Amino acid sequence: MSRTASASRRRLLGAAALASVLPAGAFAQGAWPAKPVRIVVPFAAGGTTDILARAVAQELTRTLGQSFVVDNRAGAGGNIGADLVAKAAPDGYTLLMGTVGTQSINKWLYARMPFDPQKDFQPITLVAGVPNVMVVNTEKAAARNINTVADFIRHAKANPGKLNMASSGNGTSIHLAGELFKSMTGVYMTHFPFGGSNPALLSLLAGDMDVMFDNLPSAMPHIKSGRLKALAVTSAQRSAALPDVPTVEEAGGPSLKGFEASSWFGLLAPAGTPMDIVNRVQQETAKALATPAMKERLQAQGAIPSGNTPAQFAQQIDRELKKWQPVVKASGAKVD
């Protein structure tokens, strides 16, 4: 064997020995991302989760030089898509655009959960916080003389059991905002969960549904077009995107004092994903969210961009889990 061949063989044996003691994926980590990255959206296309995921994916594709592809996996209030990510390889190539529903509400709503929202995920960063908005079909509202939240409550109480409330799915903040409204006002409405905001909005636009507490970004185009009427925002303060629209608490009277039910959306990875990848995704996402163009894009839709650290996002999820447990219990909502 020649001296060159012997040296090559020693290098190969040395690499093999090193590979045997390094963690799986250690060689790939340095090159991440070496192939397209999937961002799973656990709801149908067209809703706020999808809108935000596509905005982030576009920027990460530009800055990291690999395709970030949005994969919509709707169903079970977001649990189907979230579970797919929880069980994916922790290699940085499958991420979740999680929501307050998937990470903080569903645990208390569903009798059986396919994943643990804390143990099975590594938080990366909060992308944005979003108020919900109480919207009705403009044409139907005019026919019923509904111009305010108080008008809606009077109509609902005069027609018990006849009104239908749309949501993007069981356990979403859209659903729970409606349940909180029902419990605080004493009105009864039949809840119809859809596989995302877009199909729910289409049903509301068609006149099949009577009300929805949708995320502001997905409802905004229809509010601007005049096809939906915004009665109130569900946040504690008015939204800069709809400054003339009151909060539910402002518009609803004493029975709705203290009403607040906003949404948030953030990136998560499967538990065990290397922290160098997690930190890189967080840093690149935070940079993107801080650009004037992205800020303007999101704020025009009512979203408030964030980009906080993995530790900060983990703390927020813990707080939200504690916040929503009594709300779900008080609402009586439960999914088998």
Image (cartoon, rainbow, N blue to C red):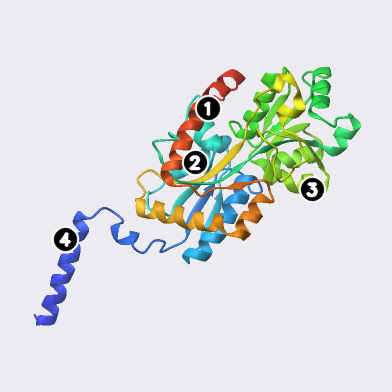
Mark 2: amino acid:
Ala
- Which residue bears the numbered disc 2? 82
Q: Nearer the viewer, residue 187 or 262?
A: 262
Q: Quadrant of the N terminus?
A: bottom left
> What numbered label is drawn on residue 224?
3
Asked if the residue at tag 1 contacts the one at tag 2, i.e. Cβ–Cβ closer than 8 Å, the answer is no
Element marked by disc 3: helix
- Quick one: label 3, few (<14), some, or many (20+) residues within 10 Å? few
| Camera-side mark, 2 or 1 | 1
- Which residue bears the numbered disc 4? 17
Which circle's residue, 2 or 1, is located before the other in the chain? 2
Location of residue 106 in the rendering, given as x and y in whole percent from the top left corner:
53, 31
Location of residue 209 in the rendering, given as x and y in whole percent from the top left corner:
77, 33
- Which residue bears the numbered disc 1? 323
Gap between marks 3 and 1, in whole Å?
A: 32 Å
Which circle's residue, 2 or 3, is located before the other in the chain? 2
Q: Nearer the viewer, residue 7 or 307?
A: 307
Asked if the residue at tag 4 contacts the one at tag 3, i.e. Cβ–Cβ closer than 8 Å, the answer is no
Location of residue 66 in the rendering, given as x and y in whole percent from the top left corner:
48, 64
Mark 1: amino acid:
Lys
Element marked by disc 2: helix
Element marked by disc 1: helix
Q: Kindly indicate the quadrant of the structure image that contains residue 159.
A: top right
Q: Is residue 221 above or below residue 158?
A: below
Element marked by disc 4: helix
